[in-house]
Image (spheres, rainbow, N blue to C red):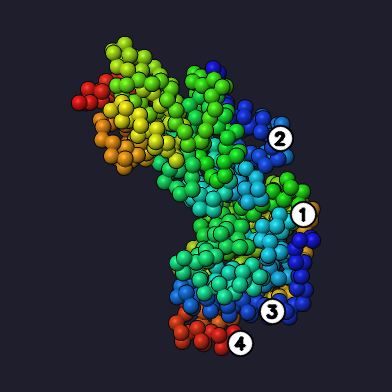
Amino acid sequence: MESSTGSVVSDIDELRKISKELRKKSLEIIYKAGSGHPGGSLSAADLMAAIFFGQMKFDPKNPKDPGRDRFVLSKGHCTGLLYSTLARAGFFDPSKLSDYRQINSELFLSGHPHPKTPGVEIATGSLGQGLSVGNGIALGSRLDDLEYNVYVLMGDGELQEGQVWEAAMSSAKFKLDNLTAIVDNNKLAQDNITKDLKDLEPLEDKWKAFGWHTIRIDGHNMDEVVDALNQETPAGKPKVIIADTIKGKGVSFMENNTAWHGVAPSTEDYEKALKELG
Amino acid sequence: MKSGATRDGYGAALEELGDNSKVVVLDAGVSDSTRTKKFGQKFPQKFFNMGISEGDMVCTAAGLATTGKVAFATGFACFLLGRTMDQILVSLAYSNTNVKLAGTHAGIAVGEDGPTAQMIVDLAYTRAMPNMTVIQPADWEEAYQATKALVDHQGPVYFRLGRPKVEGVYDSSTKFQIGKANVLKQGKDIVVFATGIMVQEAMKAIEICSKNGIDVTLVNVSTIKPIDSQLIVEEAKKNGAVITAEDHNVIGGLGDAVLSTLVENKVYVPFKKVGVNDTFAETGTAKDLFQKYGLSAEHLAKAIQDVRQEKA
């Protein structure tokens, strides 16, 4: 793609380095904002590093380039991670991140995404809508004869929304093989473990039954994440990557703890977390 | 003047819009009833029948819109709106995507299918959403022209359509404009602001009234949001008494939009809302339901006479 950067990172160690940066930056902006969602940002950091820096083609200076690869954050609450990623990718200057969750934010760095922010395609924040939106974008690529890819990142708790399965049927019906859904399967929702709310397993069988090419990986193993994203999908099949992750990954006291779904760390906790992240 | 259902005018216009590369149509598995079927047959690559999953359809339309398409997402008003308030609010209104929601079979005029199929709260839903434009055409011609006008309009729209065949009000020489109400008959004693199928009832009502010596002004308010405040204020002042008429609950629809406009502009005149009186209707023919629930031309004529009398 001529207009896009095309500078995709293929070095696994480099991607690991980026994901560490993203974790620290996510925590930093949530800490400074005094609110946000650290748990799901930390669980998805390796996935986001691999998607944005190891896969997607885009030109951050021309964020509406018609040929760009698209990303939809269906688990819209994880903006700490999203904005850290967009800034790292060059969509805007990292200094703007100080506006996160602040009134009069120039780039509209709201608690949940909005397309006024460069690099954001659509507003999300009500769970379950992103895959349908991704399908619509993938259909648009077909009508325009543009061969871009569409990535939709979902949470596991979100899969309890019925619309996700409506959308899953649509992706298969329309044979959207340029669409990849990634499930950040951190197994925790807001107030409970996902399994105790509504058990999603057997999750691979569910997606397979809905007509998807299904891959299950360790979402913190960068080799596996990159391999899964690179894996060719059979023609006409959408691809889902079920990435088993740990909510709060990288910060011992946040890991597997629902208490860290939607609260900012105290100064003491923030400093402790940074030390652990290294 | 062409008679026909507003949904037919919509379908006919879509067929002619298929050559526009931006126009795509989605339907929720009811394309025969919503009249999108012919578009689908003529332009299969641009027609997406999403099955019975309105929420998925609305967000898919939003995704298509982000790629530069004008997406007409179509279904029965009851389910297109009723099941998707959240999807419309987030993916359409807040995201300000170029999706046109076409909800057919609106109001109690749908008849025998009963209250679960009679959408009477959709104007309230959509009027309350920032960025949303709300339009309800009165006849085939207006529906046909409005559909074409929607293609050049940027942003989300709710387009409210009816099932029954109605008499023609406009001929092809009239030019539909979003945001403009228009005077169908200029009188002097009282003004009726009507929308959709109630324009038809109002035409009959003003005949009854004219026999009783009341000279009624009739205004078709097809754009309910943004409402044509200028014309509404002007006609209310000229006539000195106001009736609103809609096949919708009296809460949250045209009546409330007109009432706010009047009061905010310090126009204090006798006023009455004619509509579904904050109740669910029942099964029955449209005609019988209009009689029983107070939407018939006779009810409207009575309301006109009563409010006319309140005028000092």
Vertical position of residue A131 compared to residue B262: above or below: below
Q: Amino acid at mark 3?
A: Arg
Residue at which label 2 appears: B19
To which chain does the residue with label 3 belong?
A
Q: Amino acid at mark 1?
A: Glu
Same chain under badges 4 and 1? The reply is yes
Residue at which label 3 appears: A16
Instruction: Say which element carries label 1.
Output: loop
Determine if residue A54 is in view: yes
Q: Nearer the viewer, mark 4 or mark 2?
A: 2
Choose between B238 and B281: the one closer to the eye.
Answer: B238
Residue at which label 1 appears: A147
Q: Residue at x 68, y 65 (%)?
A: A61
Q: Quadrant of the C terminus of chain B?
A: top left
Residue A146: x and y, percent? 76, 52
Instruction: Say which element carries label 3.
Output: helix
Choose between B161 and B117: the one closer to the eye.
Answer: B161
How crowded is the residue under tag 4: few (<14 C-alpha within 10 Å), some, or many (20+)?
few
Q: Residue at x 77, y 54 (%)?
A: A147
Rounded to the nearest whole Å, what is the CA distance between mark 3 and mark 4? 13 Å
Rounded to the nearest whole Å, what is the CA distance between mark 2 and mark 3? 49 Å
Rounded to the nearest whole Å, what is the CA distance between mark 2 and mark 1? 23 Å
Same chain under badges 1 and 3? The reply is yes
Q: Is residue A269 left or right of residue A171?
A: left
To which chain does the residue with label 1 belong?
A
